[in-house]
Every structure is written in structure tokens, then in C-alpha cells.
């Protein structure tokens, strides 16, 4: 800034006097402050966020540790999704798979802190994303609500000792952790992301077994896909080590091994007992359509231009596809 | 009438201003005025804009919202530009009414000098697109690139370029 294009007279502000003036006006006009918008309307996106994030984090991390392949000499990107693929999982896979905590320690450098924002503009400014919005909305949806998930980063450090302890508690004997995996690190980045939620005023009955029970009428999520970097672990060995763990079914291991381009494919776990999935063209790219077996809810997930998109709701396949293709 | 009397009289009493809002006000008031001042060019007008901005934030948003500063900065620029535009419409009317009376031959040097007066600068600011005008006000009002990016919903990496373009557009408008 070499020259001041907007010269102004010097003004000295008296903040306390200004605050008194504001108090007087608020009092005179009887203006009530907003502390929080109505509870019921506000809680949902955050809890959706928390659940969505937990799912996304699990997917990203499981995807990474299970699908990475190739040899890394130094810090390099080992996982950056360019496409998505459905990986059918059974409830046994979900319940039997060891949690990430079994293998080491996850440390958040920037923990996930989702928050609600009042409008689209704020969602865009808070996330820094160029947001797509649906031009077509199903009938009977109310006003949109918005949530922002800022960029989140975490480091995962493998620990042979922790693995041993966890296995001992469950009375299992895990395969020994290779020396080069012990102590190695994964750097995981997710987001920023934005979720938009439309309700129709009705809430589906809670059914914990139904993954779509908590779905709003319509939800559109978009965000930077997860990125995982490694500090030099021999990831080929990592893959074979993890896929040989007790609790990972041979079918699941085979599904994961079958992914052609594991370092750029985001596996979306689809519980086969509860939902079906198929490939579908959306926004000109290949995505996945997931429908629950009751036909009550459906979801579409795809990746385009470095952004992972998801549209879900208690809508039919045709409706959800129409919304997804109308995003611009 | 105090609060207790008002309650007895069956009237609703405005809740006291939440401490978080007062804290936000103390922290951001000076900057909101500085941004508005760059646009309206007058201290009293800038403080009026700041009052309106804080009142509308108070009506609609919780004081502890993480987007509060960005919202206030953007609203300061936006509200000030509205004031500027309504003022320039009024100004044009008045100028048009008196135009026939004291028209002088235009001397380019004198014209350039006149163009540099604050009033002309403000008028030029009111003619360029709103985002450019806001960008200039936020930058000259003392905001960092990060803060500008947050307020206007643009990428941090693009602020420099947008700012240069805004300055060019503005210079062109002042010259014309």
C-alpha cells in the first residue's frame, strides 16, 4: 500500500460512550439479544456434523491404513481421493474390526470444531470454499440451515506397545508390528467442509440400527477430501500388516486389495445388511448411490475437483439425483 | 420506571446486554468505525454506521458466534456504502439543480485537484462495484489479508490480486 487512496480525517473514538449510546437505544427500542437460535433447530446440524465427522474420520483413517500401497521414502501424500468406491461391509466387519486406537495414538493438532452459521455467505466465508447450492429443491422443505467444519488436522503414531496391550486385554495375539511401522506417523487433514440441512418438520422415528434414522429431509455436504501423508513408513508392508489383523474378514481384506488405485480412491463403507449401493453418474463423474433397504432414505457421494460431495435425505433415488445434478 | 416496576406493570423488560456482547463491542467498535470512516469520510457518520451495525448484529446473532468479527467488518463496509450511495443520490440532485447557475470552463489541472477532494473520492467509491469498495475500505481500515478474506468470503491467496484490481478500478473512477 504505497499511497492512501481513501484519506480520512483523524477520528478518536470513545468506545465506552458509544456503548452507552447503544445500551440506550437497545433499551428504548426494547431489542432482545439473540443468545442462541431455537435449540431444536440448532442442535441437529451439529449432531449431524459430529456423526458425519466421526463417520468421515473413520472412513478416511480406515481407508488410509487399509488401502495405502507403494513405498514411501520421505513425507509424501499417500492418500488423496480422486474417486469414490463402495466397499460392502457386514455388521461383523464393523463390530470385529479393531479400532484405530489399538495401533497407536491419534493426536489432534486442530480438533474438529463444527459450528452453525446463519447463512450461506457466512458458511462460504468461514470455510473458504466456493459452495455449490441446489437449484432444485424437493417440495415441502423448509429454510436451509448451515454448519461449517473448519480444516482439521491430526497425527497418528503407530505403537507396537499399545497394540500388544490392546490385544492382551482382548485375549488375542496380534501379528508382530514390523519395526519400520513402529513409531511411524501418518498426517491426516480433513476439511474444511460445509453442510446444508433442510427439514420438513417431521422427524423419522429413532431406530439405532437404521443408518438413515437420523436423516433430515435433505442434506448437502461438501468439503475438501481427506488427505493423508506419511513420514516414510513402508506402506505396502503397512497394508499387509493391517489386513492380516484379527477381526478383519478375508472378504473385507479382498475387497480392499481389489481397489485398483488405492492411494486416490475413497472407500465408502456400505453396510450390506442395511443398504444397497450402485455406481451412478452424477455431475458428469462416477459416484455412488446408496439406498437403504426400506427405501426410506438414500445418499449420493461423489468427488469432483478435489471436493467430496454428499447429498442425502429421506428422498427417492430420482429426487436425490435431481438435487445433486442441480448443484451449481 | 425500573425493571421491577415494569414487571409489575406487566411490561416486558429487555434483558441486560450479555457480557459477551459488551466484550465484542469493546473489541471491535474501533475497527468497525475505522472501516466505515474510510467509506463515509466523516467521523459522526462512521459512528452512526457502527451503531446500526452492532444493533443489527445484536438482533440476529449470538455474541459468541465465531464469525462475529468477520460479520461486523463486512456489515460495516456494506452499511457505509449504502449511506454513501443515498448521500450521492441526494448530492446529484442538488448539483443538478444548481448546475445551470455557476458553470465554469473546466481546467484539467483544477479538475484533477478537485477530483482529489474527499467528496470526489467518496463519490468514486460509491460508483465502483461493492466488493471492490468493501475491499479498499477493509484494507485501509486496517484489516489484515486474513481478516479481509474472512469478511468477504474470498480465498486468502486471492486478496492481493483483488485488492490491486480494486485499486485500479478506483483510480480509474476518480480520474473519469
Image (tube, coloured by chain):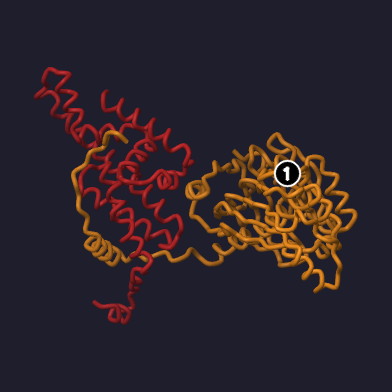
Chain colours: A orange, B red
Residue B45 place in picture, x, y as percent? 22, 48
Looking at the image, can residue A112 be seen? Answer: no
Check the image and report above or below for A203 versus B4: above
In the displayed structure, does residue B77 sit left or right of residue A282? left
A165 vs A20, left or right, is: right
Residue drawn at point x = 67 percent, y = 49 percent: A231
**Quarter occupied by the N terminus of chain A:** top left
- SS category of the residue bearing label 1: loop
Image quadrant occupied by the C terminus of chain A: top right
Residue A265: quadrant of the picture: top right
Q: Nearer the viewer, residue B51 or B166?
A: B166
The residue closer to the viewer here, A80 or A157, is A157
User: Mark 1 Cα within 10 Å, few/some/many (few <14, many 20+)?
Assistant: some
- Pick the front one: B38 or A20: B38
Q: Position of residue A53 (x, y in %)?
A: 65, 57
Residue A2 position (above or below residue A56): above
The residue at the point 78 percent across, 56 percent down is: A179
Q: Chain of mark 1?
A: A
Q: For this rendering, which residue is in front, A49 or A98?
A: A98
What residue does disc 1 label? Answer: A72
Q: Quadrant of residue A293?
A: bottom right
Give the x, y percent position of residue A33.
38, 65
Please name the residue shown 72% across and 59% down the image: A158
Amino acid at each position: 500500500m504505497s499511497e492512501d487512496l481513501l484519506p480520512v480525517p483523524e477520528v478518536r473514538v470513545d468506545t465506552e460512550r458509544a456503548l452507552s449510546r447503544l445500551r440506550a437505544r437497545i433499551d428504548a427500542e426494547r431489542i432482545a439479544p439473540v443468545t442462541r437460535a431455537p435449540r431444536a433447530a440448532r442442535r441437529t446440524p451439529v449432531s449431524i456434523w459430529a456423526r458425519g465427522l466421526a463417520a468421515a474420520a473413520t472412513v478416511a483413517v480406515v481407508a488410509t491404513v487399509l488401502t495405502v500401497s507403494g513405498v514411501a521414502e520421505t513425507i509424501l501424500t499417500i492418500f488423496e481421493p480422486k474417486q469414490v468406491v463402495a466397499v460392502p461391509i457386514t455388521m461383523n466387519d464393523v463390530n470385529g474390526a479393531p479400532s484405530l486406537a489399538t495401533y497407536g495414538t491419534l493426536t489432534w493438532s486442530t480438533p474438529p470444531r463444527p459450528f452453525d452459521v446463519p447463512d450461506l455467505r457466512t458458511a462460504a466465508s468461514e470455510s473458504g470454499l466456493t459452495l455449490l447450492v441446489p437449484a432444485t429443491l424437493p417440495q415441502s422443505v423448509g429454510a436451509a440451515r448451515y454448519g461449517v467444519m473448519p480444516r482439521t488436522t491430526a497425527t497418528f503414531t503407530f505403537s507396537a506397545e499399545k497394540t500388544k496391550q490392546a490385544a492382551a486385554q482382548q485375549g488375542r495375539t496380534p501379528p508382530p508390528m514390523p519395526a519400520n511401522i513402529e513409531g511411524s506417523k501418518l498426517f491426516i487433514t480433513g476439511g474444511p467442509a460445509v453442510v446444508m440441512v433442510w427439514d420438513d418438520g417431521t422427524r423419522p422415528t429413532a431406530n439405532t440400527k437404521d443408518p438413515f434414522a437420523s436423516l433430515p429431509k435433505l442434506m448437502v455436504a461438501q468439503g475438501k477430501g481427506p488427505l493423508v501423508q506419511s513420514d516414510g513408513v513402508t506402506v505396502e508392508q503397512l497394508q499387509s500388516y493391517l489386513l492380516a489383523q484379527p477381526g478383519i474378514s478375508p472378504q473385507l481384506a479382498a475387497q480392499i486389495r481389489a481397489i485398483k488405485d488405492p492411494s486416490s480412491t475413497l472407500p465408502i463403507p456400505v453396510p450390506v445388511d442395511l443398504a444397497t449401493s450402485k455406481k451412478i453418474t452424477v455431475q458428469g463423474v462416477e459416484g455412488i448411490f446408496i439406498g437403504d433397504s426400506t427405501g426410506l432414505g438414500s445418499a449420493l457421494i461423489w468427488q469432483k475437483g478435489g471436493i467430496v460431495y454428499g447429498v442425502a435425505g429421506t428422498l427417492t433415488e430420482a429426487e436425490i439425483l435431481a438435487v445433486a445434478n442441480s448443484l451449481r | 420506571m425500573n425493571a421491577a416496576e415494569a414487571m409489575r406493570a406487566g411490561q416486558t423488560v429487555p434483558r441486560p446486554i450479555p457480557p459477551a456482547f459488551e466484550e465484542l463491542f469493546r473489541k471491535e467498535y474501533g475497527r468497525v468505525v475505522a472501516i466505515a470512516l474510510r467509506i463515509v469520510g466523516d467521523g459522526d457518520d462512521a459512528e452512526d454506521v457502527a451503531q446500526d451495525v452492532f444493533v443489527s448484529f445484536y438482533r440476529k446473532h449470538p455474541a459468541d458466534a465465531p464469525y462475529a468479527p468477520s460479520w461486523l467488518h463486512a456489515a460495516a463496509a456494506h452499511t457505509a456504502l449504502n449511506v454513501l450511495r443515498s448521500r450521492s443520490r441526494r448530492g446529484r440532485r442538488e448539483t443538478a439543480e444548481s448546475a445551470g447557475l455557476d458553470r465554469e470552463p473546466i481546467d484539467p489541472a483544477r479538475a484533477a485537484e478537485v477530483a482529489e477532494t474527499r467528496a470526489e473520492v467518496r463519490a468514486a467509491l460509491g460508483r465502483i462495484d461493492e466488493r471492490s469498495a468493501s475491499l479498499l475500505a477493509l484494507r485501509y481500515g486496517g484489516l489484515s489479508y486474513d481478516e479481509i478474506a474472512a469478511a468477504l468470503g474470498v480465498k486468502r491467496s486471492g486478496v492481493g490480486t483483488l485488492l490491486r484490481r480494486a485499486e485500479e478500478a478506483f483510480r480509474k473512477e476518480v480520474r473519469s
